Amino acid sequence: MIYKSRLKSQSWAGENIGIIVLDCEYPYIPGNVANATTYDFPVRYAAVAGATNDRLIYNRDPELLAPFIEAAQKLEAEGVKAITSGCGFMALFQKEIAAAVSIPVFLSSLLQVPFIHQITGKRVGIISASSSNLTTEHLENTGISETTPLAVAGMEHNRAFTQAIFEPDCTLDDDAIRVGVVGVANQLMHDHPDLGAILLECSDLPPYAHAIQAATGLPVFDFITMIKYVHTSLACKPYVGLI
C-alpha cells in the first residue's frame, strides 16, 4: 500500500476533529468537550485568547469573529477534517466560519435540533447555559425553524453552575451541578409533557447526560453525540462479519 500526505503543513496525522475552545478557567471534567479523554479518538484543540464566556454569551461580541476564523483556519492547516467548538453560543458565527474554511464546520450542538424533531415528531427540550441569552439568531443560524416546537430552560439559576462557569475560581462542584441540571430537566418534562428528547446546548453539560436520561427516560443529545456522529462519517471502517 502506498500512502500520500494530505497537506504539506501537516506534521502529524490522525486527528480528524478540531475544536475551537474559549479562554476559560475551570476544571474540564471527563465528558466536557474540552477534555480529550471524553473521546475514544484523538482530537485537536485551538484556544482563542481573550474569548471569554462573557464576551460570547452575554455581549455577543462581533470582534470575536476574526480570532475564531483564525483558529479555524489554523486547525484546517494542521490537518483536521472537521471543526466544532466548545460553546453552543458560537452558533452566532456558524455561517461565517463555515465559509472561511473548506472542511465541515459544526460549531453548536443546536445544529441537531431539526434532526431531533424529525425523528421524534415531538417538542424538543433545550437546556442552555443561559436561556435568557439564547436568541432567535442562534436558532436561525443552526437551521431551527420558527415552527419547530421547543421548550427552553437554562442553568442561570443554579449557583454551582454559574459560579464555576461565569465566576470561576478554578473549582467546580460536580454533584451540585448534576442535581441542578437534573432538576431543570425534570421541570421541563413537568411543564411540557409532549417532550420527545432533550438537547444540551452547553459544552459543560454532557457529563450529566447519563443522569438526565436516568431521571427522564428521554433521548439526550449534546455536543458529544454530535461530534461522534461527524467523526464516524470521517473515519468509516470496513465491516467484518458472516453471511
Image: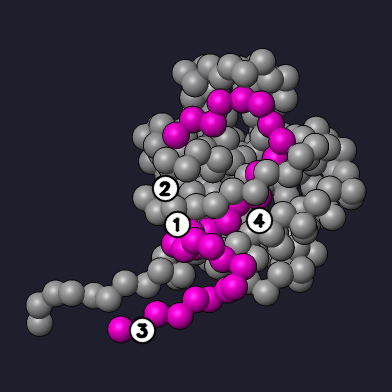
Question: How much space separates mark 2 and mark 4, taking CA atoms?
Answer: 17 Å
Q: Earlier in the sequence, mark 1 or mark 3?
A: 3
Secondary structure under tag 4 reads loop
Are the residues at dot 2 and dot 1 in contact (C-beta closer than 8 Å)? Answer: yes
Q: Which mark is residue 2?
A: 3
Picture layout, residue 177 above or below residue 84? above
Give the residues in magenta.
Answer: 1-30
Badge 2 amino acid: Tyr
Magenta segment, prevailing SS (helix, strand or loop): loop
Are the residues at dot 2 and dot 4 in contact (C-beta closer than 8 Å)? Answer: no
Q: Which mark is residue 228?
A: 1
Q: Quadrant of residue 66?
A: bottom right
Badge 4 amino acid: Leu
- On the image, numbered disc 2 is attached to which residue? 39
Secondary structure under tag 1 reads helix
Location of residue 32 in the rendering, given as x and y in whole percent from the top left corner: 52, 38
Q: Nearer the viewer, residue 39 or 243?
A: 39
Are the residues at dot 1 and dot 3 in contact (C-beta closer than 8 Å)? Answer: no
Q: Earlier in the sequence, mark 4 or mark 1?
A: 4
Label 2 or label 1, whichever lies nearer to me, is: 2
Q: Nearer the viewer, residue 49 or 169?
A: 49
Secondary structure under tag 3 reads loop
Question: How much space separates mark 3 and mark 4, taking CA atoms?
Answer: 35 Å
Q: Is residue 64 visible?
A: yes
- On the image, numbered disc 4 is attached to which residue? 107
Residue placed at 69% from the left, 59% from the top?
Answer: 74
